[in-house]
Image (cartoon, rainbow, N blue to C red):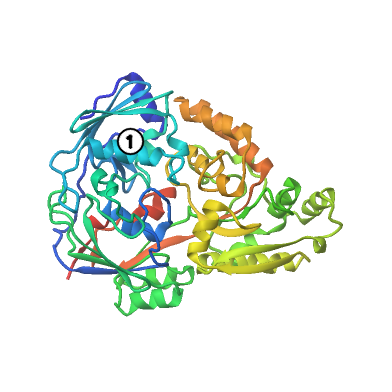
């Protein structure tokens, strides 16, 4: 068992008390080994860079090749060991990780502490574009104590470090392999259950069983073939015809029919959210009153009906899911109120809705286009001139990182189980939004910094309530709605479990447990 002092236990209670170390799944049947699962993804892989967030479709490939030090385990998102077998907190600013011995990378190289130190330092590098770089700046040093022990020293207490290193971009890579000059955007070499074998753009990405995987008896499958199907109808039809046996992004219109069909299984959640990003340094959204006005002017209930057939939950406060411990019911403010919107626009110098116009960029994937076209229709019905500009996925990824838009439709989720996940988008320099859009607010930065070091739950809740109140005042986004998202598979595909809440979009990282019952 892991050993924790009183202080360390308090830290873990803050982030959910996730102390479980069980690595096994309890099966009602004995799994069978062998076979291939063809899985339809909503967009092509495009970029395999390991420390950068590329979205849900990439998790199915990337997170089945790479391991982290620790990971989230379904169904309750406890922390479980991956490349670290145990961890201790001798004091408030020290973590010591004991590493798994006998692990090999897919190229045959031995895994050791130098690989962990190297990978963590790459994740921390603010010049390297790593998604977690701003959140890991409390790390003061990473020390190799022996070949399979790593010490992380912090400059101050950090209540979310374990959540960060369990998240979707905290992968551990072979130091020597990376330094040999490989192209990380096109090659992968991990310690995970599947080895990267082939990538043909627009056709497929092939993963094959890692026979030396450190989890005994896993994976069960011989092969996973990820096939891009951007068109929703083509994707669901591929499942119905058994061209593929697993699909992500089940179209909402097919939820009921798939669930009613005994030949298939459905797993779904409602925590990804659709939003409009505003560039706060470009007119008209350089005026906070315009940003606030759109949050009152776009009717969320109508938007959900038009874009997702009524399946969704309006975001009336922040991005924390209703009913979860940090949700603040009393902060609800975003309701449809065209009179308030018009008053704000008039304060900003617009005489009527017809005086407001902007270009809305939108990636050509259905979960974005349906919402963007509905928003355009709702606003144009009130007189606002909205011009839609469709972009491809690489452009979307570039805009997320570097800006280049006035307004952009997007769909995201919080990347780890803690309100500190707000920092990925809104902390000064954050790669998820702030850096590209030039967004910065000293008050938000201060509150995020306070929340990160606080270990008392009630105090943290007060801090993040103040954070959300300030965020709503600044309105850097149009906060839209929590949308339905799900995966479906043939009934003979067994072993799939969905992670809860915001982690649901990373559930496809657990393919080592899939098996075919036929």
| Residue 125 found in image quarter | top left
User: Which residue is found at the position 36% from the left and 30% from the top?
Assistant: 12
Residue 175: image location, x then y, percent? 26, 43
Viewer can see residue 268: no
Does 240 appear above or below 511? below
Name the secondary structure under disc 1.
Answer: loop
Q: In this orientation, which residue lies closer to the viewer: 514 or 227? A: 227
Viewer can see residue 122: yes
- Compared across the picture, whether 217 is left or right of 434 comes to left
Residue 153: image location, x then y, percent? 35, 25
User: Which residue is found at the position 68% from the left and 63% from the top?
Assistant: 359
Residue 152: image location, x then y, percent? 32, 28
- Quadrant where the C terminus is found in the figure: bottom left
Does 102 appear above or below 515? above
Q: In this orientation, which residue lies closer to the viewer: 245 or 509? A: 509
| Residue 342 found in image quarter | bottom right
Question: In the rendered image, which residue does mark 1 sit on?
Answer: 18
């Amino acid at each position: 068992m892991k050993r924790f002092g009183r202080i360390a236990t308090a830290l873990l209670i803050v982030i959910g008390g996730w102390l479980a170390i069980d690595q096994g799944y309890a099966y009602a049947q004995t799994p069978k080994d062998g076979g291939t699962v063809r899985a339809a993804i909503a967009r092509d892989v495009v970029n395999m860079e390991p420390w950068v967030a590329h979205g849900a479709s990439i998790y199915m490939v990337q997170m089945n090749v790479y391991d982290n030090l620790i990971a989230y385990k379904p169904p309750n998102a406890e922390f479980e060991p991956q490349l670290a077998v145990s961890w201790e907190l001798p004091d408030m600013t020290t973590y010591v990780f004991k590493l798994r011995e006998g692990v090999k990378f897919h190229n045959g190289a031995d895994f050791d502490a130098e690989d962990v130190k190297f990978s963590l330092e790459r994740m921390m590098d603010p010049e390297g574009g790593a998604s977690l770089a701003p959140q890991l700046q409390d790390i003061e040093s990473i020390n190799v104590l022996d070949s399979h022990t790593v010490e992380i020293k912090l400059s101050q207490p950090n209540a979310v470090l374990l959540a960060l290193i369990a998240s979707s971009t905290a992968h551990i890579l072979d130091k020597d392999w990376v330094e040999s000059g490989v192209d990380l955007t096109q090659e992968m070499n991990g310690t995970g259950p599947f080895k990267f074998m082939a990538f043909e753009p627009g056709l497929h990405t092939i993963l094959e069983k890692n026979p030396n995987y450190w989890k005994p008896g896993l994976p069960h499958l011989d092969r996973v073939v990820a096939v891009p199907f951007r068109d929703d109808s083509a994707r669901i039809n591929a499942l119905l015809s058994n061209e593929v046996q697993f699909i992500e992004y089940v179209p909402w219109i097919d939820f009921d029919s798939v669930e009613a069909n005994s030949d298939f299984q459905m797993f779904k959640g409602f925590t990804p959210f659709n939003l409009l990003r505003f560039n706060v340094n470009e007119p008209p959204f350089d005026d906070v009153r315009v940003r606030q006005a759109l949050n009152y002017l776009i009717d969320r209930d109508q938007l959900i009906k038009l874009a997702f057939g009524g399946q969704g939950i309006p975001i009336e406060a922040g991005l924390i899911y209703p009913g979860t411990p940090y949700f603040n019911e009393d902060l609800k403010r975003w309701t449809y109120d065209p009179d308030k919107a018009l008053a704000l626009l008039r304060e900003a110098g617009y005489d009527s809705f017809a005086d407001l116009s902007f270009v809305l960029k939108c990636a050509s994937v259905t979960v974005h286009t349906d919402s963007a076209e509905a928003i355009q229709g709702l606003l144009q019905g009130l007189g606002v001139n909205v011009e839609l500009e469709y972009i491809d996925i690489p452009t979307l990824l570039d805009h997320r990182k570097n800006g280049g838009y006035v307004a952009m439709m997007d769909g995201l989720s919080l990347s780890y189980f803690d309100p500190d996940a707000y920092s990925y988008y809104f902390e000064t320099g954050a790669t998820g939004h702030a850096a590209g859009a030039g967004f910065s607010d000293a008050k938000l930065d201060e509150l995020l910094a306070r929340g990160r070091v606080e270990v008392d739950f009630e105090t943290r809740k007060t801090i993040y309530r103040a954070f959300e109140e300030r965020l709503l005042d600044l309105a850097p986004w149009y906060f839209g709605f929590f949308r339905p998202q799900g995966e479906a598979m043939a009934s003979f595909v067994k072993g799939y479990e969905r992670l809860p809440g915001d982690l649901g979009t990373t559930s496809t990282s657990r393919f080592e447990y899939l098996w075919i019952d036929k």
